[in-house]
Amino acid sequence: MPVKKEKLLVPREQYLSAGVHIGLTAKTADMEKFIYKVRPNGLAVLNVATIDKRIGYVANMLAGKKNVLVVSRKENGQDAARKFAELIGAKSILGRFMPGSLTNPTYKEFFEPDIIVITDPLADKQVMKEAVQMRIPIIGLADTFNETTFLDVIIPCNNKGKKSLALVYWILAKLITEKRKEKFEATLEDFGYEK
Amino acid sequence: MPVKKEKLLVPREQYLSAGVHIGLTAKTADMEKFIYKVRPNGLAVLNVATIDKRIGYVANMLAGKKNVLVVSRKENGQDAARKFAELIGAKSILGRFMPGSLTNPTYKEFFEPDIIVITDPLADKQVMKEAVQMRIPIIGLADTFNETTFLDVIIPCNNKGKKSLALVYWILAKLITEKRKEKFEATLEDFGYEK
């Protein structure tokens, strides 16, 4: 059986230097399967090949969608989520999510997306709750300590760090744009990446 | 906030009489989140709304795909998987899965699907292993005792019973066909459903 050479979406070093694989010392049973190892200091580290595979898979899923909502309540994800949404033609909700945005048709900002991307299942709990109620599929970034009960698709990754979030959303935007045969010229810095 | 009425893909009674929600007395940590309750006799029962939501979601995903592989090593899933594959224009592999089918380009039945549907992560372990190696996304039916480590998308359901498997694959086929604006006339019996 021929051995397949590792072929990642970006070089492994780029993932590592953005800390995409870095989890927390705390972990949930839900995320156990994505953990590659626990370092002597107790820090759980995610499997880079799985992160990469899931990013590719989610990009594929989103490329054909028109009506996407991207959410980041957390400050650290906002630059990345904003730029990502802008480039793929999605709506973004950053910061506070107004209850009823997905469930109350009389609310003036009421919105019915086909699919939702959330940056953190804990911080973005309200949107997740409403999406479940409305039966909208949810893609979620999740680190080692997240609960994933309500996520339909999980991208395991460091969803705390600004660099990590910038890289994940940047790769997604790049793949989706390329799949649509559009030009992609955004830099990591446009996504809030700080060296 | 208006209460949304339950709107399932088929009536709840139809799910229940096919036993789609019936799990096993044994359960894995992976599947904990899909379990609605454990009956006094120890039988774990899956959440019907989640089953329904995931079926709809997977149908959406598959509707746009051309190069799909459907696998069922288990006898009880073969009628359903065969008919499903036939109706959506997928390839099916039923019974024994020849090692190398996905990894060895010199093998005459070598095949490179864009996405794979497996009926049981335990019975279909070999295809799962090869799909992981080839980085092909895997959709898997999974009951309360399955491990889901290598599944990218999970349809929680009874993947043991003939009726349950017939119903799940029938709904999937129906939704995909309708999404493609094609006519759907297959009966549950065509999928191996026995009253």
Image: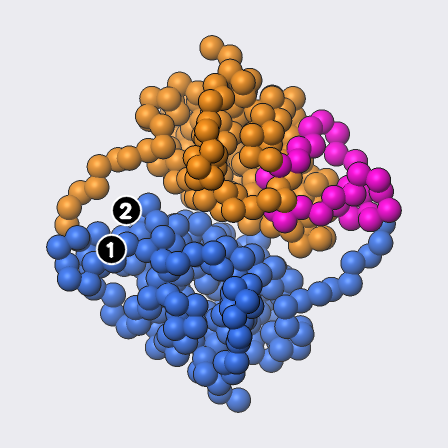
Chain colours: A orange, B blue
Q: Which residue is mark 2?
A: B133
- Say whether residue A114 is magenta: yes
| Label 1 crowd bin: few (<14), some (14–19), many (20+), radius 10 Å | many
- As helix, strand or loop, the secondary structure at mark 2 comes to helix
> Which residue extends farthest top?
A195
Please give left or right for residue B167 compared with residue A74 in the image.
left
- Residue drawn at x 48%, y 19% as measured from the top left: A187
Q: Hey, which quadrant is residue B175 in on the image?
A: bottom right
Front position in the image: B52 or B146 = B52
Kindly report the distance in space between the C-alpha atoms of the residues bearing marks 2 and 1: 9 Å
| Residue found at x 30% / y 72% | B94
Name the subunit of mark 1: B
Mark 1 lies on a secondary structure that is loop
Q: Image point 49% across, 21% down: which residue?
A: A186
Q: Earlier in the sequence, mark 2 or mark 1?
A: 1
Residue to which mark 1 is pinned: B102
Q: Which residues are magenta?
A: A90-117
